[in-house]
Structure formats: C-alpha cells, structure tokens
Image (cartoon, rainbow, N blue to C red):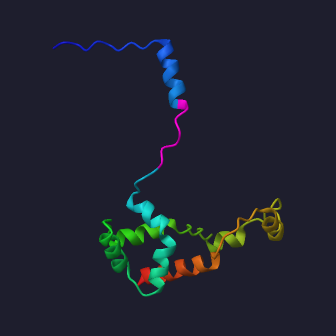
Amino acid sequence: MKKKAQIRVSDKTLQDLRASLSSLPPKPKTEHCARDTVKALSAEILHATTLGYSFADIAEHYREHGVEISPGTLASYLREMKPAKAKKTPIKARKHAQPDVNRLPTSSVASAMPTLPRKDQAEDDHLIKTLLVRDDR
C-alpha cells in the first residue's frame, strides 16, 4: 500500500488562512432543533396549556408543521427551562447553624442587585406554575 504524501503549507498560506478565518462573519442560523423551538415558543406553549390544550395536542400541532416531537419530550424540554429549586437545609442543620456575620441584610442585597426589565414576569410565573400542576397529574 502506498503512503499519502504529507501536505506542506507555507507560513504565508498559514497567515492568510488565519486572517481569513478570523474575519469570517457569524453564519446565520437557518434551522433549529426541537429543543430550540420549544425554548423559543415556550410562552406560547404555556399559554396554550392555560387554554386547555394538552401536550399531546401541542405535539400534534408541531407534527402538522413538520416537527416530530412527543408530548413527553415537549414537557421535558419545558421542565428543563424552569429554574432549579434550591435544596432545603435539613431542620437539624438549620437549628445548629452559626449566623454568618459577613452577610448583608436582605434589603441591602436586594437594592444592590441589578434588575432587568421583564415584561409580564408575573404572567410567566403563573403559566409555569400552571404547567407544573398539569404535569404532576
């Protein structure tokens, strides 16, 4: 069997390639995976559930538009997007825990933290809670 000849690249070609690759503009995304579509449409999906549509109904709607997704996968992707719950400290550990003297009072922390403007945050929270209640059934 014959060995392939090694490709040799000059320093000039290497520099040209580096400059060319460094100056490439971002390539626009034209296709999305199912997880991305659920993320992008999460508000609409949650709204549909408040109108009485099940995940099976919504998955069928996806299929009608050429996107194959199961109701379970749809629910799973939505659950991934909800904020993780903080673990509770066991009662015994809380009773014996020493107070953190370096901790700022809650009001100072809240006022020091930047807030981002969020349209309809309360509505989003309500929809997520509704989804979680429906999902637990």
Q: Is residue 15 above or below residue 130?
A: above
22 in relation to 79, above or below: above
How many marks do you count on the picture?
0
Which residue is at a point 55% across and 31% down the rendered structure image? 22
Q: Quadrant of residue 114?
A: bottom right
Range of the magenta residues?
22-28
Q: On the rendered image, what quadrant is the C terminus found in? A: bottom left
Is residue 48 toward the left or the right of residue 71 in the image? right
| Residue 74: image location, x then y, percent | 39, 70
- Label the magenta part by its dominant secondary structure: loop
**Toward which corner of the image does residue 84 lie, by quadrant?**
bottom right
Q: Position of residue 62 (x, y in %)?
A: 35, 71
Q: Is residue 118 magenta?
A: no
| 58 relative position to 24: left or right | left
Q: Nearer the viewer, residue 112 or 85?
A: 112
Residue drawn where x is 47% and y is 16% of the image: 13
* Viewport quadrant of the N terminus: top left
- Viewer-proximal residue among 112 and 95: 112
- Rendered location of residue 12, percent (x, y): 50, 14
Residue lying farthest to the left in this orientation: 1
Give the x, y percent position of residue 14.
48, 18
Q: Nearer the viewer, residue 137 or 54?
A: 54
Q: Residue at x 43, y 63 (%)?
A: 37
State the image quarter where residue 8 is shown.
top left
